[in-house]
Image (cartoon, grey):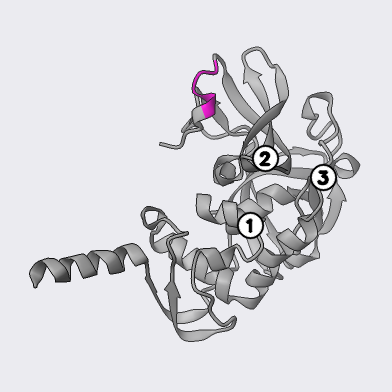
Amino acid sequence: MLTIASWALEPEDLEILWLAGHYQHPKLGRQIRVVTRSDPSGNIDDRRVLPIGLLPLLKPGRVFSRGTIRDLPGNGTPMSAHIPNLAGGEDLDAADCVSMSLYPFGGHRGWGQRVLRYFVDGKILLIPTFELIRALFLHNKALARAILQPAGLINLATPVEPGFHEKLQIDFTWGMPRRSLNRDIVREFAWITADPAARTAWDSVLDLSRGSHYVSIKPPPLDTRIDFRGVRWKTAHLVLEITGISGRSLPCNYLSYSHPAERSLRASNLKSES
């Protein structure tokens, strides 16, 4: 069950309206400002903060009831778009490209956050940088915590040489919880750490976001189709949640991995058998 414990006692359902930035708390670490809209009152609160590790859950339009994400689809309409070059987006302030008619922000102007603008298939496609980074990279808490940390990936696995590998071995460290690993996570991690364009894009998030309250990214040059929930007004389409993204491929023919928890278990079993 996907939950946010600090919202468990909220009397009203909370819709994530927008992510309003990040900052480093001296004791609590990296925090994310989350703008919510309460239902049924409609009250908007832009003072909520959550740990960065929860970013995989923080998708605009999603609704939480007493801290638990609702299974129903979030607000917005299912859409899709073909982007010939994901690296070709223009990085803009949300206030400069998201009109009040498209997404009103409850009367605010985007809280100084960034949006990538694409002109595709006769329409304007606007993707919040927070959401693109989440969809490309932040598949669990460990990856979310690492994205704005220097050498964050090194704390999760032994470095591998970027480029294509016939056989790629990922040796995770204790920094990557064993319980969070599955086939999809291992494949996603292999793409992030070994594909040169993906690794450059990952590193760009820290480089471009350092010293700012917003996040930016130099996206990889993918020819991609994205499926998303979004809102539209005339030719403008704003992405709220990316639900699918194509164009990525494994940088290897054969992929395997190890984790110290499994090595410890094997060692324990050998000891017990001796």
Q: What span is colored magenta in the figure?
A: 6-10
Q: Which mark is residue 235?
A: 3
Q: Residue at x 84, y 40 (%)?
A: 112
- Distance between the Cα atoms at labels 3 and 2? 31 Å
Question: Residue 32's image quarter?
Answer: top right
- Distance between the Cα atoms at labels 2 and 1? 13 Å
Q: Which residue is mark 1?
A: 147
Q: Establish if 149 lies above or below 2.
A: below
- Examine the residues drawn in magenta and state their main secondary structure: loop
Q: Establish if 119 lies above or below 264.
A: above
Nearest the eye: 67 or 117: 67
Disc 3 crowd rating (10 Å Cα; few below 14, some 14-19, many 20+) is few
Amino acid type assigned to the residue bearing label 2 in the image: Ile
Contact flag, marks 3 and 1 (Cβ < 8 Å): no
Image coordinates of residue 119 in percent, x first then y, are 82, 57
Asked if the magenta segment contains residue 7, the reply would be yes
Image coordinates of residue 156 in percent, x first then y, are 50, 64
Q: Residue at x 35, y 66 (%)?
A: 260
Amino acid type assigned to the residue bearing label 1 in the image: Ile
Secondary structure, mark 2, is strand
Secondary structure, mark 3, is loop
Amino acid type assigned to the residue bearing label 3 in the image: Thr
Image coordinates of residue 190 in percent, x first then y, are 51, 71
Q: Which residue is mark 2?
A: 32
